[in-house]
Each structure stands twice: as structure tokens, then as C-alpha cells.
Image (cartoon, rainbow, N blue to C red):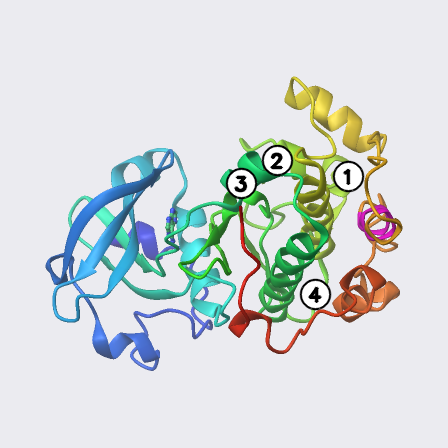
Amino acid sequence: LTNNLNKGREPTLSTDVDDPSHPLYHHRRIVTDFDYGEILGEGSYSTVLIGRDKRTGKQYAIKRLDKAHIVKNNKVKYVMIERDALSRMNHPGIVKLYWTYKDNRSLYFVLDLAKNGELYTYIRRLAPFDLDTTKFYAAEILLSIEHIHSRGVIHRDIKPENILLDDNLHIKVTDFGSAKIINENENATTGDGENSSTAARSFVGTAEYVSPELLRSDAVSKEADLWAFGCVIFQMLSGKSPFKAATDYLIFQKIKSLDYVMPDGFSPEAKDIVQRLLTSDPEKRFGSAATGGISAIKEHPFFEGVDWENIFTSTAPPLR
Ligand code: ADE
């Protein structure tokens, strides 16, 4: 199993904590370093629990992945990518990966604990958000996406369920289980190209937030995260995602034909930014290299008054 889990790993990546030159190598952790508590969430291959460091008392979210299940379902590659992508991240808006360790049954990822759970829950409860609240969360999400891309990663599953809120109601983007690590010189990547143990996966991500280029089987690039970002802004302002439908098939049809209705209640600036982000052609989509990159999005009138430098240390708007 150890060999399986190391197979296909990029030996040149310095993100590998098994490499003695990696900063995490020198303070490795083991299962018994933590007390385990409440279950925070359960996925098909993993469970997230509250963990408490016995030495410091500090609480973490510990993601426990079942090795047998992962190997049986050919998900080893995704687990490796999740860990490698996470370990490249160093940003207040993204869950930090502190340590990884394993026992006979499981792999463990020790992550930042985001005590207030998913943005999704707050949208369900409180949407439509007012303009200041939407602006605040959209700005934090945009800075986080900018960081992810700057570290050579496409998240590919940006959605309110994967945007967690910490004790101060600032965001922490999580779940890099669908991420793609891109070659710094490469801007686009066709599906899972080269080493595809992924043939069984019809698409990566979540139907409602999937970009049109992915449905066309075109190259998927960083701009796919900006499409999803547009969907999330729409959802905060209206309470529902723009391409909602009864089945995944119908959702895909709507996305392909750009079939969504801009709510009357959206301000002109909100309408404009959403419309620019929900552009079918990723090269023309707001935030693409040709349209000025993420800096151009930051300068859009929708974000007027946002203090980009200090937003993560500012007081979050009251969510109620
Ligand atoms: N659920 C999944 N990941 C989590 C995290 N990092 N913090 C809180 N709840 C979570």
C-alpha cells in the first residue's frame, strides 16, 4: 500500500513532506498526538473530526481517509493531489494543512478548524445577502482563488459548501480533492490528459457550478474557478445558483445554452460582474489573461470601497 500511495508522485515537487528538505518533515505527528471528538462532516472516502493537540490544546479539523476504500475505488491519485495542492497553500482564506500522518487503516490530514461551518448554510438561512455582505465574501473568495492560482493549482470545485467560515466569520476555502496541479508554464490542461485513471469520472466538480468548457470537453483552465465564482456571487445575492434544475442533465443543458435569468433585484454593478463572469468562452471570461486577469475583477465597480490589503484582518459584516 505504501508503494501504491507513492506511485505517480512527482519526485521533483518540494511539496512532499516525505522529503527531508520539506519544512514539515522535522515535526512529524502521529495518531496518538491528538484526541478525537465530534464528527464535522462525512464524505464518501473520508470523515472530518475535531481533533485536539494533546500538547498544546489547540483544536484542528482532522480529515481521516480510509486507505482500503481509496485503493479499491482508484482514488489514490486524487488523495495525493489533494495533499500536494493543500501543502502549496499559505493564505488566510484557505485551510492550512499542518501535518499528515497515517496508521494501518487511515491517512490523516490535520487542517485549520473553521468553527462556523459552510457558507452554504448561511446562504440557505439568510439569502439574499445585502450588498456589503456579498461584497465582503466575494472579495475574500476572489483573493483566495487568486492565491490558489498563483500557486499553480486550479480548485475545480468552488461552491458554497467548500467555503467554510472561521470563528470570526472570515472564509477558509477547503476540499482540494478535485484540484488540478498545473505546470507553471502551462495555462490550460485537457481533462486529465496524460495519466488518466479517471475515465470513470464523467466530470470533476459539482453539476451546478461546472463551467461550459468542461461540458464541451475543451481544455480546462483557471478560468473555470472564475465561472464558479460568478455562480457563488449570484447565489449570495439571490439565494439560488443560476443554473438550478431537477437533474444534472438539465443543469448541463442550461449551462451549455447560458440559460439563466438575472434577478431584477440585482444592482447594475452586480448584474455586470455576474454577466462578465458567466461568459461561455473562458478566454473572454472576466479575469482571463486577455481581460486583465484577477486584478481587473478587483477593479470592477461592484467591489468599490473594498480594502483588499486588510480584508482578512477586518471585522466581518454581521451575518444575521
Ligand atoms: N468540515 C470539513 N472540513 C472542515 C474544517 N476544516 N473545519 C470545520 N469543518 C469542516
Q: Position of residue 85 (x, y in %)?
A: 48, 61
Name the kind of residue labelled 2 in the image. Phe
How busy is the neighbourhood of tag 3: few (under 14 within 10 Å), some, or many (20 plus)? many
- The residue where tag 4 is placed is 186
Mark 4 or mark 2, earlier in chain: 4
Mark 2 or mark 3, earlier in chain: 3
Name the kind of residue labelled 4 in the image. Glu
Instruction: Say which mark, if any, is on residue 212.
Output: 1
Q: Is residue 159 left or right of residue 222?
A: left
Mark 3 or mark 4, earlier in chain: 3
Q: Secondary structure at mark 2?
A: loop
Q: CA distance from mark 3 to mark 1?
A: 23 Å
Q: For this rendering, which residue is in front, 62 or 311?
A: 311
Instruction: Say which mark, if any, is on residue 203.
Output: 2
Mark 3 or mark 1, earlier in chain: 3
Foreground disc of the pair 3, 1: 3
* Residue 202 placement: quadrant: top right
Q: Is residue 66 left or right of residue 229?
A: left
Q: For this rendering, which residue is in front, 168 or 275?
A: 168
Magenta stretch in the rendered image: 271-277
